[in-house]
Each structure stands twice: as C-alpha cells, then as structure tokens.
Amino acid sequence: MVYWILLQKSFMRNMQYKVAHLINNAASAIFGFVFIAIWVGVLQGKENDSPYTALDMTFYIAAVQCILWLSGFLTAGLNIHNGIRNGAISLELARPTNFFLYVTSQEAGRLVYNLFFRSLPIGLVFSLTVGFYIPQHILTYFFLCISILFAMIISINLFYLVGISACWTTEIDWAHFVNFTLLVGLGGQLVPIDLLPASLSSITPYLPFAGAIYYPVMIFLEKISSEVILIQLVWVVVLTCFNLWLTEKARHKLEIQGG
C-alpha cells in the first residue's frame, strides 16, 4: 500500500508542472518532425530496396517519440546519487520499507504522468500532422499494454542500476551517459535495430535496450510477433533480481562504513 501511495504522490507532484511540460512536448514533437524529414529524404526513390517505406518510418519515429517518455527520459540515477552525496541514503535504507520499491514506485508515478500528459499529447500532434498508426487487431492493444509495462520496468531497473552504483563510485554522470547512449543507440530510437550492421543486429534483439524501446514500438506497428514479450519478461526478472541483490550489497557497504 505504501508504494501505491508513493506512486500517487509522485503523479500529483508532477501535475503541478503541466504547463511547463508543454514546452518539452513541443520540443519532442519538433525533434520527431526532423527525424521523419531525414528518413523521408533518405528513403525517397529507394523504397523498393528498403524493408521500410517512408510511411513506415513516419509511423515508427512518431511511436518512438511517444514511448521515449515512458522508457527513455527517466530521472538520472532515479536521484539515488543525490541521497548518497548528502547522506540521506542512510535514513532511506533504514526505513521499514524496501528501498528498491520505495525509489522505483516514485519513478513509476512520474512515468504514469508522462503517459497522460506527454506521450498521448505528442501522439495526438503527430496524428493531426504527419499521421499516426492505428493497430488493426484487438489483441495488439493487449500485447502492447504488456510490452509497454515491461519496457517501463526494464528502463526503471537500468536507471536504478546507474543510481545505486553511486554507493561505490559517488559520481554517476559517466554511467548515466553510457546507459542513455546504449538505450537510444541499441534500443532503436533513430534506426530500427534490424537495420544496424550485421554484427550488431544479431545481438541487439536480445539486449534489454531493445525491450525498452524497439519491441513496444514494433508491436504497436504490428511488425513483429508478440513472442518478443518473453524476451522482455526475462530482462524484467533478471534486472529486478539483480538490483534487489545489489541493494542489499549497498546496504551492507554503508553499515560497514558506519553510514
């Protein structure tokens, strides 16, 4: 129950910044238009030699810009590193709650807010301008909801991993940069991962980054089997278990150091 309350409080806190966030939404839409223009220019006259048409990439980029607010643009380190710098981490770990769930539930509330006040408005903008794909099969919506949920959990875990690493490194800027670069680069933000060089496209489908962006987008576009949700599920379990274990290691480290 306490984690559900934290999620709600986080959602309500973000509600106070709805107007300010409209600027971010506009910027995200503009970036989407730029990427779409680039892909249309690249594919013009070459669509017969490409697995994607200009319209396919228009729908792809539009969907990516929406999903990024759910699994890409998360709080750096989930703010864990700030607690380590000012010593608040000691009190947070001493609370009679699970620290992992305590932190991630707050970020989950922010992502739920993003769904309603960032992703959906941006999708509406694209639908009124360049077009937005509408799934043709009812089951697609069911699998899409599961895939998006798993994508959010995967990303929260990746960003939590960066944050909790501050217990050993103090500074997380480099880890956050590497994590975000891999997320957008190997997650298919700009280029679908099946268009990457063979050396990369053979392994990227099995990495967590694909589960955070590429798979939910492709399920939405109905261009991939829903079986890829199993790959997402594996990463959800693996990353969650690993972070729970790492949290205990961080707790012991602080206790040994007298934190």
Image: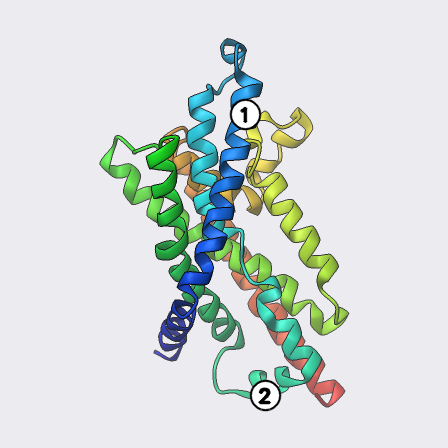
Question: Percent position (x, y) of residue 95?
Answer: 52, 87
Instruction: Judge whether 250 appears above or below 219 on screen.
Output: below
Question: Percent position (x, y) of residue 14?
Answer: 43, 68
Q: Which residue is mark 2?
A: 91
Furthest residue to the left? Answer: 138
- Where is residue 133, by image quadrant? top left
Instruction: Say which element carries label 2.
Output: helix
Within-10-Å neighbours for mark 2: few <14, some 14–19, many 20+: few
Q: Which residue is mark 1?
A: 39
Instruction: Judge whether 232 appears above or below 253 on screen.
Output: above
What residue is at 39 percent from the left and 61 percent from the top?
113
Amino acid carrying label 2: it is Leu
Q: CA distance from mark 2 to mark 1?
A: 50 Å
Tell which of 245 and 66 is nearer to you. Answer: 66
What residue is at 75 percent from the left and 68 percent from the top?
171
Which mark is nearer the camera, 2 or 1? 1
Amino acid carrying label 1: it is Trp
The quarter of the picture where the N terminus appears is bottom left
Q: Is residue 94 visible?
A: yes
User: Which mark is on residue 139?
Assistant: none
Within-10-Å neighbours for mark 1: few <14, some 14–19, many 20+: many
Instruction: Judge whether 199 appears above or below 237 on screen.
Output: above
Tell which of 201 and 109 is nearer to you. Answer: 109
Question: Percent position (x, y) of residue 200?
Answer: 66, 32
What residue is at 43 percent from the left and 60 percent from the top?
111
Question: Percent position (x, y) of residue 106?
Answer: 46, 71
Q: Earlier in the sequence, mark 2 or mark 1?
A: 1
Instruction: Say which element carries label 1.
Output: helix
The quarter of the picture where the C terminus appears is bottom right
- Where is residue 58, by image quadrant? top left
Q: Is residue 207 left or right of residue 118?
A: right
Q: Is residue 228 visible?
A: no
